[in-house]
Image: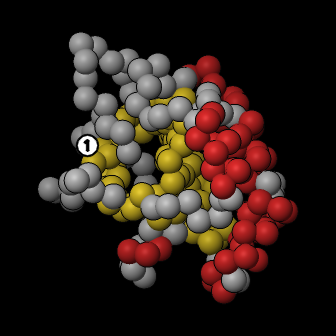
């Protein structure tokens, strides 16, 4: 059985080269040369380490789920040599809202899923939940995106649309970590976070 818990550790090792760390909202994270993504806990300390679990979709209806599944391509595509890890923390005001109120802000007001659908399949994504791991976690979500270098401009447009939405008023911490990896050679093991 595959673990649902993933570790994202910045330091001197890892498949992904950290190209840039952009501080969006709140405190940032220090720059490090590499990022390792693994189901196994890190064996040694790094510059920083984040954890997240793959979970079910929480604000998506069945029709939205079906649309996403039909258009989304998987991670680890050979030509998707660019990635972004975007850790996000939302305010306590967000978490005090009921599930249906959060859903209304997420989709009916902010159109989060609808915006994302416009950028598929060029941009692949996976969401990891951190809040359920305990209060010591610095973020609520870790969002992982992969795309080809020529789709980075589209990725920036996607982020700009999401950041302009009503949902983003509840974001109190966000860091945009841009990554790149070499093109695969001779059947490499590309982690599929």
Q: In this rendering, would 154 be left or right of 34?
A: right
Q: Position of residue 45 (x, y in %)?
A: 21, 59
Q: Quadrant of residue 57?
A: bottom right
Q: In this rendering, would 128 be left or right of 187?
A: right
How is the protein colored in the picture? secondary structure
Residue sitting at the far top: 186
The relative height of residue 118 versus residue 90 in the rendered view (above or below) is above
| Nearer to the camera, 30 or 97 | 97
The relative height of residue 110 versus residue 122 in the rendered view (above or below) is below
Residue bearing mark 1: 12
Residue sitting at the far left: 43
Q: Position of residue 190 (x, y in %)?
A: 31, 31
Q: Quadrant of residue 59?
A: bottom right
Q: Of helix, strand and loop, which one carries label 1?
A: loop
Name the residue at 66% across, 55% down: 62
Q: Is residue 94 visible?
A: no
| Nearer to the camera, 13 or 121 | 121
The quarter of the image holding the C terminus is top left
Q: Position of residue 124 (x, y in %)?
A: 55, 36
Q: How many marks?
A: 1
Name the residue at 28% across, 14% down: 185
Q: In this rendering, would 180 be left or right of 155?
A: left
Q: Position of residue 43 (x, y in %)?
A: 14, 56
Name the residue at 36% across, 21% down: 182
| Nearer to the camera, 5 or 34 | 5
């Amino acid at each position: 059985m595959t673990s649902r818990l993933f570790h994202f550790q910045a330091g001197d090792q890892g498949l992904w080269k950290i190209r840039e760390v952009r501080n969006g909202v709140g405190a940032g994270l220090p720059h490090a040369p590499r990022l390792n993504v693994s189901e196994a806990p890190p064996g040694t300390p790094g510059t920083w380490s984040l954890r997240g679990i793959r979970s079910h979709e929480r604000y998506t209806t069945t029709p939205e789920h079906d649309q996403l599944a039909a258009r989304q391509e998987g991670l680890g595509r050979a030509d998707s040599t660019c990635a972004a890890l975007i850790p996000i923390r939302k305010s306590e005001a967000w978490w005090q809202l009921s599930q249906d109120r959060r859903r209304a802000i997420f989709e009916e007001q902010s159109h989060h899923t609808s915006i994302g659908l416009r950028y598929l399949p060029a941009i692949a994504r996976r969401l990891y939940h951190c809040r359920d791991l305990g209060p010591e976690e610095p973020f609520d979500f870790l969002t992982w995106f992969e795309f080809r270098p020529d789709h980075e401009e589209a990725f920036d447009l996607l982020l700009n649309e999401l950041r302009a939405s009503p949902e983003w008023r509840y974001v109190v911490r966000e860091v945009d970590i841009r990554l790149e990896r070499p093109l695969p050679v001779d059947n490499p093991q590309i982690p599929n976070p």
